[in-house]
Amino acid sequence: MQKLTAHEHPLRKIFSSDFEFKIPEYQRPYRWGKDQALQLLDDLEETLDRGDEEPYFLGSLVLVERDDTAFDVIDGQQRLTTLTLLFSVLRDLVKGEEFARNLGARVLDPGNELDGIPSRPRLTLRKQDAEFFRKYVQEPGNIAALVGLSDAAAKPEPQRAIRDNAAAFLARLSGWEDERRRALATLASTRTYLVVVSTPNLDSAYRIFSVMNARGLDLTPADIFKSRVIGQVADRGDYSKRWELAEESLGSDSFTEIFRDIRTVVSGDRARRELLVEFPSQVLDPFIEKGAAANFVDDLLLPYAKAFERTIAFDFGPGDEWKPVNLWLKRLDMVDNKDWRPCALWAMVEHPDDAEFLARFLKRLERLAASGPYLKFFGGQPSPGSARRSWSRRRASLAGSSR
């Protein structure tokens, strides 16, 4: 039986035929900016200038093994993509055909023409960006063309990030002596290390994700929930795209708040522990266990994301019948807490076409929200059972009085 493994490897092994990396469709797109890319280069340069043999540790990768050498990247996409950019810029700048060819092999497996084995990229990005990355980054000699692309030619945000980071590397490294560029390439290949954590399946990767998030890495609860949900649906590409569109329309912080509000609606209770613990057990696990991950997206996440967006924009539509609804959303937004929002979202999801109901419901909700803190929704009861019953009764009371 396959087990979790963890090994430390230099980048010359990471970017070799031992690993073929693929970014799954359910992953976020490439988002590192110039500050992060240049920080990586600064760290490498500082290590180079120390002049000793001390290695540089770059962090870890979390992978799901598809076969002996093919892996889905669960955590580490940003670093792998940026390192590929760095190797590609060095390849196009360095003097000496053999050195450039060796650098190129970090980016593209050269294959074997005699044996009919084509070259292939060491790293394959998501379908939306893979061809762009292969053409302008991984194929040799195209970095200058990449840097010169207009916003129209590199329209999606990840492609602009790739272009901008390549430009930042090119601007910095163009001013170096060739000997120094070679030394940097050697340092990056031989003395720069990653710990590769390989798991047998996505569920195992999710557990590692949870631990890493708890230790302060840049993973949001939404990232972790996405890895579980999208990994369980048949049409991963479509559901990943829909998930990302919802997140992009709201922003990362607001998108995370949706999960907190859905948890409150489903459980009818106050949060007792952190979201990463409560949301799976109270909301997500039943969908996963029933093989209904797609239903979670269709029936909960996307409708609540749409409703959440309306609480921000105060816009249910241009018709006169929606003006009172929009007015009460504005009034609710002025309350000094957001404890009213789960109730409002529930009403907007359950009655999206009933302007009269929503106007009455939100009016009463605003009065209740303005009268006291969150415990008012639960009748001030501290116990989970009584809180759940009180919240359900309150919601039913608001809904009944609005008919």
Image (cartoon, rainbow, N blue to C red):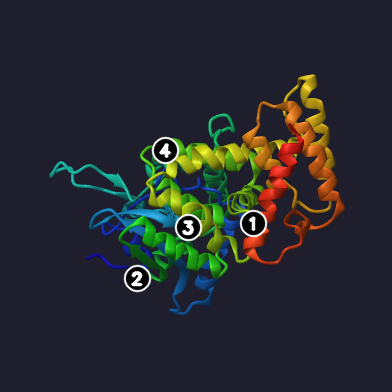
In 3D space, how far apart are the residues under numbered discs 1 and 3 (Cα atoms)? 44 Å
Q: Earlier in the sequence, mark 1 or mark 3?
A: 3
User: What kind of residue is marked 1?
Assistant: Arg
User: On the image, numbered disc 2 is attached to which residue?
Assistant: 6
Classify 10 Å Cα crowding around label 4: few (below 14), some (14-19), many (20 and above).
some
Element carrying mark 4: helix
Query: What is the distance, in whole Å, between disc 3 and disc 4 at their CAs?
Result: 23 Å
Q: Which mark is residue 79?
A: 3
Residue mark closest to the camera, 1 vs 2: 1
78, 24: nearer the viewer: 24
Q: Nearer the viewer, mark 4 or mark 2?
A: 4
- Residue 144 image position (x, y, % from top left): 49, 40
| Residue occupied by mark 4 | 237
The answer to whether mark 1 and mark 4 are in CB contact below 8 A is no
Q: Which mark is residue 388?
A: 1
Q: Amino acid at mark 2?
A: Ala
Specify the amino acid type for callout 4.
Gly
How far is mark 1 from mark 2, CA to CA?
Answer: 43 Å
